Image (tube, coloured by chain):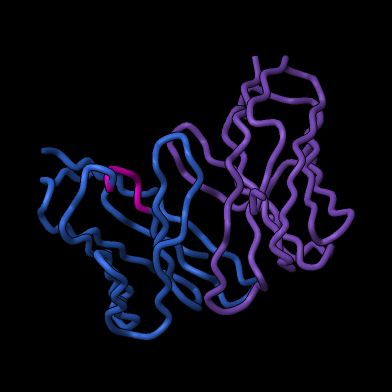
Amino acid sequence: DTAVSQTPKYLVTQMGNDKSIKCEQNLGHDTMYWYKQDSKKFLKIMFSYNNKELIINETVPNRFSPKSPDKAHLNLHINSLELGDSAVYFCASSLRTSGGETQYFGPGTRLLVL
Amino acid sequence: GQNIDQPTEMTATEGAIVQINCTYQTSGFNGLFWYQQHAGEAPTFLSYNVLDGLEEKGRFSSFLSRSKGYSYLLLKELQMKDSASYLCAVRDPGYQKVTFGIGTKLQVIP
C-alpha cells in the first residue's frame, strides 16, 4: 500500500534510446510532479499536473514528455536519451497546488545512460 | 525566480543541537518547507512555515523571518539516524512551484 510508487527503480540504457518511467499515487491527490535530482543532489522541478492538466513546465528539452491519463498517474517519456539525462527522477504528489500542501515523494528512478 | 542558499555540509555530535540556516531571495513567497533526505532515498517532509516565528515539532523546530528572507531548522538531541541531507524549499505564489535549495548534508558523529 505504497503511497507514491514509481517503476522501474533502476533503468540502464544506451544513448539514443527511448524510455518511459511510470508513477502512480493512491493518496487521492489532485497534483503530481516530476523532479530531476542530478549528481550534485540538486532537486529541480520539471513538470506538474493538476487534475490531468499541465500547470508547470520548466525549461526542459522537448525530448521529455509527461502524460497524465488520470489524476492518479503521471508518466514520463524520454526520447533520444543523452548522457546528461543520467540522474534520479522523483515523482511526487500533493493534495492541491496551494498553501502548505506537503509533497509526498516516490522512491525515485535511477536512470543511467551509457 | 528563486535563489536559495544553505551550507553544503555540517558536522555535529550525537546528543547536541544543530542549526541549519537557509536564506532566500525571491520574486514572490508563499511558504517555506524543510525536507529530510537520507542517502539513496526520497525526500520526506519535516516542516512548513508561512508566517514569521518558530514552529516546533518534537526534536525538530523551524523558524521563519520573511522580512529577512531567512529560515533555520533546529535539530535537538541529535541521533545518528539524523545524518541526512536537509533541503530548504520555497513555494512560489504564481504557479505554486516549489524551488529546492542544494541541501545541507549533515553528518552526526559519536
Pick out the residue farthest to the right: A69
The x and y percentages for residue A18 are 82, 26
Check the picture and name the quadrant holding the C terminus of chain B.
Answer: top left
Which residue is at the front of the view, B54 or B104?
B54
- Rendered image quadrant of residue B19: bottom left
Visible residue check, residue B8:
no
Q: Which chain is purple?
A: A
> Which span of residues is magenta-colored?
B82-86
Image hue for chain B: blue
Left or right, B102 with respect to B14, comes to right
Residue drawn at 13 percent across, 46 percent down: B14
Q: Is A44 placed above or below B34 here?
A: above
Q: Is B52 placed above or below A21 here?
A: below
The x and y percentages for residue A21 are 75, 36
Which residue is at the front of the view, A107 or A17?
A107
Left or right, B60 with respect to B44, comes to left
The x and y percentages for residue A90 are 61, 44
Residue drawn at 24 percent across, 64 percent down: B59
- Rendered image quadrant of residue B109: top left
The x and y percentages for residue A70 are 87, 58
Q: Is A6 placed above or below A112 here?
A: below
